[in-house]
Amino acid sequence: MNRRTAILGVGSIAIGSTAVLGSGAFSSVDAQRSISINVADDSIAYLAIEVLNDDIASVSDDVLQLTVDEQLSETGGKGVGVDSEYKFRNVFSVTNQGTNPVVLYGDEDGNTEPYVQLLSGDTELTKSYAADETSRDTISPGQTSDPLSIAIGTGTLDRKEHSIDFTITAATEEELDTHGP
């Protein structure tokens, strides 16, 4: 047997064994699994919400709702004005009933209108706040946040009733540092 035949035979064996054994990599998988979850009211969820100002905040169908309308006024006011920003202080608080410290932030940064922005004191709890490792505060398990406030920016909304969705996010620092807000 000559050298070329031996090298060709060894090469064929190496390629053949790779094809049989494979590399372990795959391009897609569909796998059905089951999961068991408990869904709880806001007051007993992992991120529990407590209403502090029932003039503007309430719990309806186990979800926090904020309502700014004529019910806030004893002197005839009907709502917020066009092209303006209103701040409502000490509206609600949250308690971390989970197992990890979390950073709390809202989904709006106030750069687009209309918006609802989450505030703690005068600090805007935005995605950029959550991304800044040096300034963000965490809420430890069992700890309740300082009273939270909201800012509503109306822009040039029509003069009628509007519904604006608003998301509050609680993320671990590891999640923020790995994936961002």
Image (cartoon, rainbow, N blue to C red):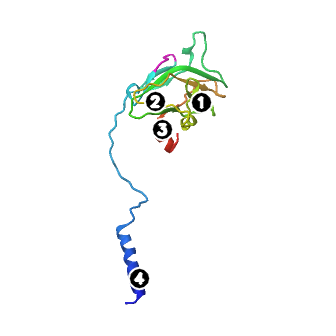
Q: Earlier in the sequence, mark 4 or mark 3?
A: 4
Nearer to the camera, 77 or 8? 8
Magenta segment, which residues?
Answer: 51-55
Nearer to the camera, 29 or 133? 133
Q: CA distance from mark 3 to mark 2?
A: 11 Å
Residue 68: name its quadrant. top right
With respect to residue 160, does 8 lie above or below?
Answer: below
Horizontal relation, residue 70 to residue 143: left or right: right
Residue denoted by label 4 = 8
Q: Position of residue 49 (x, y in %)?
A: 44, 25
Q: Earlier in the sequence, mark 4 or mark 2?
A: 4
Q: State whether the magenta stretch is mostly helix, strand or loop.
A: loop
Amino acid, disc 4: Leu
Q: Please name which of the two marks, 3 or 1, marks the residue nearer to the observer.
A: 3
Asked whether the beta carbons under mark 1 and mark 2 sit within 8 Å of each other, the answer is no
Amino acid, disc 3: Glu
Residue 35 drawn in magenta = no
Residue denoted by label 2 = 139
- Numbered mark located on residue 173 in the image: 3
With respect to residue 67, does 29 lie above or below?
Answer: below
- Numbered mark located on residue 115 in the image: 1
Q: CA distance from mark 1 to mark 2?
A: 25 Å
